[in-house]
Image: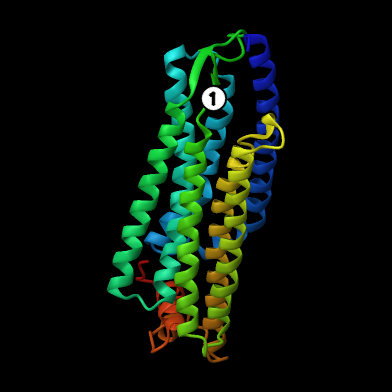
Amino acid sequence: MDQVQILIDLTEQRRVFNSVLLASFVVTAVDHFHTFPAEVRLVWPRQWSLVKVLFLFSRYLPWIYGPLMINKDVASQLELQECRPHMIASSLTMMTAILLAQAIMFIRVYAICGRGKKLLCWLIFQYIGIHAAAFAFLILFHMSFQYIPSPIPSIMACLPINPDTSKLATVYAILMASETVILIISMVGFWSYRQNTTRLLSTLRKDGLVFYVLLVCLSIANLIFDAKPPKPSMRFMLSTPLTISHSVLSCRFVLHLYKITESETMSRLPESSTDPKSFIQFAKPRATTDTKWVAVHTSNPSSSTTSA
């Protein structure tokens, strides 16, 4: 295949990819502005904790890797040997966004399943093992690219060709397997507390199920589009929506949880109570898992000593 045909194919692929990229970030911007008041009210005043740090990184990291994803297509100043590191950096930043978003859901599973030491050890092992493998195969995928000089160096420095898409498919398969295991563990936890019908546990069930179903579907779609795309230009087009979905869904999960726990705590206050410090007296852990989670996440932000 001559360079002209390669350029035509790559240009069409970039057009499709960048259109999906733009649409994904429009959705992110709309979601961000829609939920920003809730973020300011429910997250910002809280003392620093693991969940707050993960939330803020998941929330704002898309605005870092977005420009990186765009810049890699128009970085005409790069030398040919710099193209691969530039591509790897943008992809690893996206994978980091997925890693941070999934950490929130791992913490959720730990909370709803009783906070046992054995479960904690397994979740840490799974989290580190799964994401280390995903990072490794992602790097192998990028190492499989061949880079040739661009016929239009004033617009882009190089052309990436001939990737081994099986490596990227392995990344999606690993993520999908991890999400499936977490879903199974979640269902076991829900079954253990099936008699508890509080609004908080109902939220954990529904939001968690929606989170995993959507992400598994997107992972399957990525596998299909990367291995057997309807058109060559549609390959890789769903990688950004998958990453964006991780960030948006995990942040919405945290905000929704904070809203529910805030309203439940307020409903327990005496009507005559106006002391904001009285929030904390209703957050004492009892025998059920839902109140353990409340104890971690619902105390008044200004006086909370929580950590996730």
Q: Is 169 displayed left or right of 5 in the figure?
A: left
Q: Is residue 293 visible?
A: yes
Q: Is 123 displayed left or right of 22 in the figure?
A: left
Q: Residue type at mark 1?
A: Lys
Q: Is residue 56 visible?
A: no
Judge whether 78 appears above or below 73 on screen. above
Q: At x 49% / y 59%, what residue is drawn?
A: 179
**Which residue occupies the foreground of this view, 298 or 163?**
163
Judge whether 273 appears above or below 148 on screen. below
Q: At x 53% / y 58%, what residue is drawn?
A: 250
User: Badge 1: few (under 14), some or many (20 or more) residues near its Cα, within 10 Å?
Assistant: many
The quadrant in which residue 299 appears is bottom left
Q: Position of residue 151 (x, y in %)?
A: 61, 7
Q: At x 44% / y 44%, what residue is drawn?
A: 96
Instruction: Read off the residue under disc 1.
Output: 72
Model colouring: rainbow
Q: Position of residue 54 (x, y in %)?
A: 43, 55
Judge whether 236 appears above or below 56 on screen. above
The quadrant in which residue 103 appears is bottom left
Judge whether 237 appears above or below 196 on screen. above
Q: Position of residue 36 (x, y in %)?
A: 61, 56
**Which residue occupies the foreground of this view, 115 or 226?**
226
Count of labels in the image:
1
Which secondary structure lies at badge 1?
helix
Q: Quadrant of the C terminus?
A: bottom left
**Which residue occupies the foreground of this view, 259 or 130?**
130
Q: Is 220 displayed left or right of 188 in the figure?
A: right
Q: Quadrant of the N terminus?
A: top right
